[in-house]
Amino acid sequence: MYEGLSSPNIHTPKNLGEYASIILHYPISSLWAGGTFIMSRPDSYPSRTMNAEIIYLGDIEELHRFQRNDRFAEFGAMVTLDEILSTGKTVLPHVLIENIQSIGSRLITRRATIGGTMSTKNFTTSFPGTLIALDATAEVKFIKKKRLHSRWMQITRILDKSGRITLPQQGMISRVRIAFSEKNCQYFKEVGSFMLDPENSVSTAFTATLDQDILINPKIAFTYPTHGVCYSRDIDSIFSSLRFPLDDNEVRTLESMIFTFVESSFQNISELQKTRTSGIVREIIDDLNEKTLTAPAETR
Amino acid sequence: MKIDCTIDGKTLTLSLNSDKPLSLILRENTGDDVAVNHCNGNMCGLCVVLVDSKAMLSCMVPAFEIRGKTVTTFDSFKRTRNMKDIEKAYESVGSYPCQDCYASRSLVFESLIEEGTTDPEEILKELSIIKCPCMDPEDSINIVLKGIEARRKRNVRRPQFS
Amino acid sequence: MADRKNFSRYNMRCGILLHAKAGNERIAELKLPDLDARYLALTGSDLPGSNTIEFMGRSMPLIAKETISYKDQIVLALFAPDYESATLMMREVSLSTEPIKEAEENSTLPDSLEYSWGDMYDNSDGKYKEAETEFSLTRIARHNRRLYTVTAWMEGSNMHIEAPSQWVELIRDTVERATGYPKRNIIVHLLQYTAKHDEYLFEPAMLAAIAATATIRTGLPSEIRDDGFFSRPAVNVKRQVLLDEDSRPVYESAEMIVDQGAFAFAPEEYQRQAMTGLIPPYPLKGFRGSVKITSSPSYPASFCGSLGYSEALAATEYHISRLAEEAGTTPNLYRAAIEKEKRKFTDYIPGFELDGQRKCTETVVKSSSFDRKWSANTFQKEEFGLLGYLKGIGIATGTGIAGFSTTLSKESGFSAMMTFTQKQNVTINTSAITHPGTMKIWKKRISDKIIPGRPEGVMFLDPGPDTMDSGPDVLSRLVASFTLQLDSAAKRLSVLKETEKLPVSLKFDAENTYYPCEFENSGNAAVVCEVKIDKATMIPSVTGVWGAFNFPTIMDRSSLENSIRRTIMMTLRENGMNVPLSFRIHLDLSEDGTDDTISSIQQLARGLTLGALSNAMKQAAGDKSASLPISDEEINKIFREEE
């Protein structure tokens, strides 16, 4: 074996019970889902800092389950994005499908898992933002008093102040539940490459029901990969107070309100990220303006 | 750790670090020098192999995940009849990938042809993983379509007369 | 061919390199961790021979010794039993540097190349309208996402090197110089590669010299690997022109400044090639052209990225479009108004007829609706201001050239030998072993002339100690110029074989050294490029490219088309363009069968695509966009400033 480099031990629990006993035995270990993020970091191998214990979640049968009823779909954390696309393309919310499709090649989506995309360290993918816009919930498993507990939580509840998904120590996301949305306005856009140019990329997920000229229950989340998710109920409230179509002045006011919030959350987003955020907001507004101007209310 | 796997038809027991990427294993540990690139996380897309017949970026597959799996690199794939279909498609479109991405692009073409993907957007999305700019979108789409055609022709069995 | 490597990797040393983080610095301290006998560290002082790579009369250090000349220069090579150990150990190496306050003057650079005709008019009386244009290209210096691997091993008295390379002889020379190992005993096994520009030239030779040294020092086979690098020099072309009342140029001066990086290889050749592209195709009473090479502490471009013709041609085409703008007409119509039937004969390029170029231009102008789009874009831009309209279209037209200049061909003496054997076969001794497709065409062309219908009787000798140096295969130089030399040798040999005793051999130059000008024109082309900038994302996209290419002869239509498409795609992408789903390249290829000269497709297609793209970007994004490559970040900056 290589000088000074010990090979990490790989634990492959077959069920959550085994997972619990391993994590209790090796409290400091890395959880490995699809590995797309870990493996794509520069100089990820060889590394002395890589934890000596890796728990590979791919063999846990429970984490591969996919259930649906007439109200929601529920995915195990190890369900891959490609599986989500192939099983739920026609029934799942449009915004989620677009988010998966924006990744592009199936060489990535076949390996990336829904749980993995939410749990990357020091980097935020576009998925938490989309799940927030969809009002999704996640089941978080964590160890308390040497036992494995679980709790369903809104994604916004596991988002810390800095906009990152934060799980309890030794915790993991085991399931994600997405309600079948009846919202008639769903919009997702990712601009720039999250992996190759994170400093200039941004993604936005937006969902709302447009009823006549107002938005009901709008939700909008902006994601900046190196900063985190920017989401606020205040912004949602501003959207719900608007009457469409908006004129140029109203758009400018809305934009400045959004920027005040984005900049108070993340001080140093790049100029290009600002332009892109503004461009996406304008595209959403243009789309909403168009809808309110062209279609009769009952057909929207 | 010891890892048993099959690479290009050879059953191997490899002793290596459990998190070593498959791309480096192929370059360093298999005894043959397999021509996959390793770009250190730059997402070049030039390390595609088939793992249990599915196209994957070998730099994203850690050693422990290939236990018991069958890895096919372009070195063995190029001798298959499926590759002949792809070569025919290159010839009939009059376009072929450069030496740098020939292996990876051919394997992605293979996965698209095998799945019978004809939607141009899907085809280009799948190929977007390969960052080499040597081929224009129109040619890429045509190659897949021609490849599917060649594969169908080959798969149509001639009627047997007794 | 000699045996390829057949040793176990477990019995090998694996090497990686430490690169400098900045240029123009002095090494204050290079601190290595304790290394046991299984490791080998090589610094600039550890090479048994000379620590230099040298070609065409220029040299640079293999490993930085005291001074670091450029960012990413090799500072240390570390060999270990495996790459993991080497990588981990390398992380413990500490390099401390201090900036060099007084930059050393690079005395090896050639003087500026000047070329002129006619007397210049001082215009103090204001007789002519004055115009000034500026074209610039920003330096590209980045990893090309490819891992170069070079292996060295000994077998008996021979040193074997396995590497990808455009120039086998350079590897042998460099290894001999660095190790003192006799060149006769250095055998190179070529790995396949695709050089999109001028990569695979000095890097493989440098890696080979370092790996060979490690092999000699450890007695074990050594492999070294490193990330490939691509560097294009920064180019700036300023033109001043005096225009008559019809906006026709009358007097013109053009000054091209090229920053080659820390070291310049073949700068004189670059100057000649660049001057060829810089000379305008329209008549002038007076012209002054100069090409100056400068240096900076950045990664050197092997052959300056493209030998210079492409960039200079793009600059000239950019200039013509700016003059057309000034004249208030489309570049196509402006060109027709200012050009004559024939170009002026100069020392660099003959005075050829321009009707071939015009036909190509007509084809692309028609198929792309160029005049209409150009006018519409100009009008819309004036109407709606900068942010309202972000479309652009550009055109570039030019002729192809091939190979090295006549001066370099005479100086370098790259040659090859063709022999008709007693067994009625033809053997060729050359280092120009290139891609299988080209070799197949060569074999057929030679057999047609000497042994018709028997291409298998034409054999290129495997590389060995007596291989003749036919020069580097940069930018399809070999396809373009060597093909004609092979043809001509085959013709002469077909006569000699009847009159001389067999075997009969013929030594010939790899390049034609008898041209009256530095270059011969060959083929014509025109390219139109249309771009659009997305207002919301600031991403520049190319919506379409239209190209018309006319050549005297087409050897293999499919390969030619493929090569043009590939060059266009690569040029667009390396200059920061996004290629959307709807993007199409519309190509029109024709041959007139008049003459048998072949041009370097890469130089021509690259230069014209670059020119057309610069023009299109200028129209789409305004004055500050002229410098390519351009990124979405830079476009955003331009618009923010405008706001």
Image (cartoon, coloured by chain):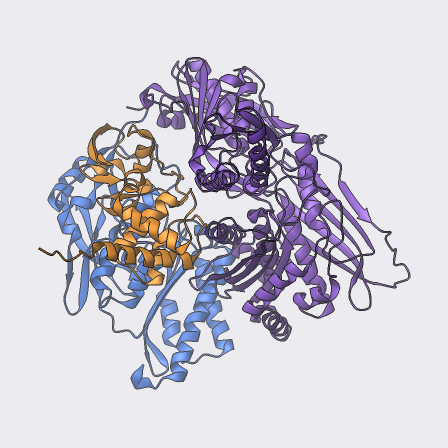
Chain colours: A blue, B orange, C purple
Residue C116 lies, in percent from the top left, at: 80, 47
Q: Nearer the viewer, residue A144 or C462?
A: C462
Quarter of the image with the C terminus of chain C in it: bottom right
Q: Can you say which quadrant of the picture contains the N terminus of chain C?
A: top left
Q: Residue furthest front?
A: C499
Q: Residue at x 56, y 16 (%)?
A: C49
Tell me if residue A3 comes above or below residue A108 in the rendering.
Answer: above
The x, y position of residue A34, in whole percent, is: 26, 46
Task: Out of A162 and C356, give the one closest to the viewer.
Answer: C356
In this rendering, position of residue B47 left or right of residue C201: left
Side of C114 where A46 appears, left or right: left
As drawn, A213 above or below A172: below
Q: What x and y, as percent, mark residue A246? A: 45, 79
Q: Specify the quadrant of the image occupied by residue A44.
A: top left
The residue depicted at 17 percent of the width and 51 percent of the height is A63
- Report the front residue among B82 and A28: B82
